[in-house]
């Protein structure tokens, strides 16, 4: 039985804010270009209700907020 060459790629980015639309676009383009399996974005400073502004085609988004 042949074994498929599959791999898992993960991007972990500390964004430091995604409020400016230009930054959201730049981050989205970077993620699209790299085509990771999983993207982890830290310090986005967006609210859960605004998460659709980050949606990429074909991807699922899970938002976790922590408050210290």
Image: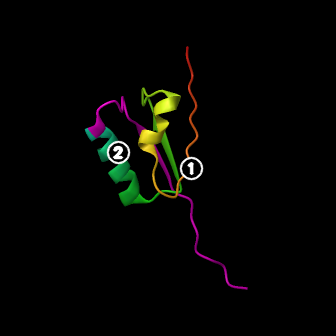
Task: Please tell me whether residue 19 belongs to the stretch shown in magenta.
Answer: yes
| Residue 64 on image: x %, y % | 58, 31
Q: What mark, if any, has residue 41 been given in the picture?
A: none
Q: Magenta stretch: dominant SS?
A: loop
**Mark 1 surroundings within 10 Å by alpha-carbon count, few (fewer than 14), some (14 through 19), many (20 or more):** few
Residue at 73% x, 85% y is: 1
Judging by the rendered image, the residue that carries numbered circle 2 is: 27
- Lower position in the chain sequence, tag 2 or tag 1: 2
Residue at 58% x, 74% y is: 5
Q: Which residues are magenta?
A: 1-21
- Total marks shown come to 2
Taking 3 as reference, is 17 left or right? left
Q: Is residue 66 above or below residue 36?
A: above
| Residue 58 on image: x %, y % | 52, 58
Q: Is residue 67 above or below residue 63?
A: above
Q: Quadrant of residue 8?
A: bottom right
Looking at the rendered structure, the secondary structure element under dot 1 is loop
Looking at the rendered structure, the secondary structure element under dot 2 is helix
| Residue 7 on image: x %, y % | 57, 65
Task: Please tell me whether residue 59 belongs to the stretch shown in magenta.
Answer: no
Mark 2 or 1: the one toward you = 1
Residue at 34% x, 40% y is: 24
Judging by the rendered image, the residue that carries numbered circle 1 is: 60
Nearer the observer, 32 or 21: 21
* Quarter of the image where the C terminus is located: top right
Q: Quadrant of residue 20?
A: top left
Tell me the distance, in whole angstroms, between the alpha carbons under discs 2 and 1. 16 Å
Kindly indicate whether the residue at mark 1 contacts the one at mark 2 (C-beta within 8 angstroms). Answer: no
**Coloring basis for residues:** rainbow
Residue placed furthest toward the top: 68
């Amino acid at each position: 039985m042949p074994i498929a060459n599959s791999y898992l790629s993960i991007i972990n980015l500390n964004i430091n804010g995604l409020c400016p639309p230009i930054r959201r676009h730049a981050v989205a383009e970077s993620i699209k270009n790299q085509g990771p399996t999983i993207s982890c974005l830290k310090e986005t400073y967006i609210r859960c209700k605004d998460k659709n502004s980050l949606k990429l085609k074909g991807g699922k988004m899970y938002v976790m907020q922590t408050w210290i």
